[in-house]
Image (spheres, coloured by chain):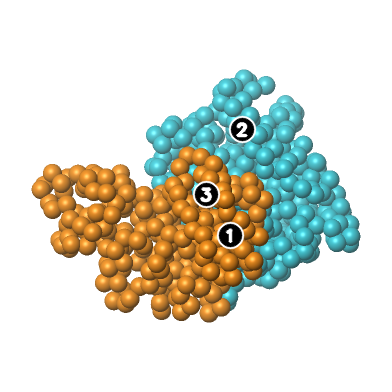
Amino acid sequence: MWEDLNLDLNAHDALLGVLGKVYGDIYMAQKERPEGMDYFNFVMTEIHGLRIKELLEEKKQGRKIVGSYCVFVPEELVLAAGATLIGLCSGADFATHEVEQMLPRNTCALIKSSFGFKLGKACPYLEVADMVVGENTCDGKKKAYESLKKIVNNLYVMDLPQMKTPQGRELLKNEFLRFKDSLETFTGKPITPTDLKQGILTVNAKRRALHRLASLRKADPAPISGLDALLANQVFFYDNPARFTESLNALCDELEERIQEKKGVVSEQTPRILVSGCPMAVPNWKLPWIVETSGAVIVGEESCVGERGVRELTEESGNSMEELMEALVDRYFRIDCAIFTPNQDREDHIREMAKAYKAGGIIHYGLQFCQPYTMEAIPLEKVFEKEEIPFLRVETDYSMEDVGQLKTRIEAFIEQLQ
Amino acid sequence: MRCAGIDIGSRSMEVVVLEEGNVVAFRQGETGYAPLEQAESLLRGLSWDRLMATGYGRSLAAQAFSCPAVTEIKAYARGARELSPFATTVLDIGGQDCKVISLRENGKVKKFEMNDRCAAGTGKFLEIMAATLGFDIREFGERALEGKDILKINSMCTVFAESEVVSLISRGENPGDIARALHTSVVLRALSMLRRIGFSGELFFAGGVARNRCMKHLLEAHLQEEVVVPEYPQRVGAYGAALLAGE
């Protein structure tokens, strides 16, 4: 199967070896994990196995696979076109030497990683995808797609607005309409209002399950670790939507029981942390691993792989194509990504989340060289300091070279909260 | 009650034992490549009721000696408060890192800054530069104190700074002046961290680098204020850990 996908078998084996070990050391070493996480363990062990087989099976039946790197790509439209959307690998350093022949060294780890998986031939999702959707978010990604197009021949680039003005909304709407047309041409299947409505219902159901998980994390003691909750948010991008929703709801049922029994993964009064900032794609578990092995628990992620990505639902009441498309544009236009200027909503959301999840402190996670988020971090730090909410600004990448220093900084921050 | 603190830093380790708040034992050694053996040998023959580990090797020590651990940030804050009750900010320049800690009125950590990746602007930087100039570390500080402020080192990167030094030597510049410029570059970096944290009030300067008289002199010259350096700046972490062990 792997050879058919044109993967580099040695590199892929090496990747899976490392992934398995890291997963064991970080995830399986946790105590008091809910039984419902067994499903997510299974998904992770089969992330480059059964799931790929399923996708190949879908392809055999004529279904198209669309890959994406961003939460601005509307899964509702992809599903409505009878295709499947999957998140593409961008959470680990890979084939760094080859990458640096195409990108400047001071490019963020996430962009470098997406190139590395292509150049190193190690991401089966990318190889399975019939269409890869890039999006003009930050300058780094926007320019990188020009180079990515040379190695990914089925790349489609979607433009995005940078201001929340009527003109900005118009731009997003036109881009969504263009994407809809492209999907229809690509799949040969016209999208009907019924299809789109069904797509909206399916994706909203996934999001509602994550909302349920988020709200259960308000409990003290925390019924689930931040690492496990992050994993659920990460699997959101890979899994079959209906199965994901069902498994996550089963996990939430168990967490509800735990809360009633006052059972947690940590004791009551454990310092609670809100993580805010750049997305963490599989297998980027570095920061939460450090935080949760330093005596604190993460209770929320203000992140694309987290609440920023799923906070908003799409209005479901419309019936005509016009109404449904408007609802879709409304929904995505509310995302408070740092590419928008100004971006006051994000500050407000961080504040609301810290309060709702009773976080004692906020750790801002910035990927080195990610201008939009690292720039927002400085004024955010000042604002929250004024409000006496402890705030730690971290800038890092996927390498392990700074783990010692990070651990000292994060432990000292947690000491401040005790 | 006898309380002990052990601070395992990247370059050196210190042990302090307190009896009713007074230092009754103080030992120091290089961390080296076998920190646990070194720690055992430093602790040999000492007795205590409670032990607290801190520093870069704190988790290792906590495991080996079944004791609690705190970060060096908390330990330095505690030690500094005890030694200088009016200090509002602590600057700790150690072997491989540089930290700035601002204190609340009650002595608790309010905010801190720390270099996050490389050893630029730390003891290790000064050590390598001293070797490039052929000075031992003590002589390096003394010569810098006499040096003139006529040169500038532009790079904070140890490797790049070393090549700057080599070219200054080959230009025939006075080694004391070069030493002065190197000290200034470390001080400017510390000052920018101090500014980031919003420094005001009394500065407490600790860590091994605080023993360097030129560093203290240059800091005072730039801040135009007196800087407090304790008698044993390198043992503030172990001392703070010992105090925390008793609390």
Q: Secondary structure at mark 2?
A: helix
Q: Amino acid at mark 1?
A: Ala
Q: Which chain is represented by orange in the image?
A: B
Asked whether the residues under marks 3 and 1 belong to the same chain, the reply is yes
Residue A230 as seen in the image, left or right of residue A398: right
Compare marks 3 and 1 and give the one earlier in the sequence: 1
Task: In the picture, one chain is cyan; tell me its letter.
Answer: A
Above or below A117: residue A319: below
Residue B238 percent location from the top left of the image: 52, 60
Figure quadrant of the N terminus of chain A: top right
From the top left corner, tell me how far across and down residue A386 is, in percent. Answer: 53, 77
Res A387 quadrant in image: bottom right
Query: What residue is disc 1 on?
Result: B4
Quarter of the figure with residue A277: bottom right
Query: What is the distance, in whole Å, between disc 2 and disc 1 at their CAs?
Result: 41 Å
Residue matched to label 3 = B42
The chain containing the residue under callout 3 comes to B
Q: Is residue B156 left or right of residue A228?
A: left
Q: Secondary structure at mark 1?
A: strand
Q: Quadrant of residue B106?
A: bottom right
Residue in front for this viewpoint, A164 or A252: A252
Query: Which residue type carries mark 2?
Result: Val
Residue closer to the observer: A221 or A66: A221
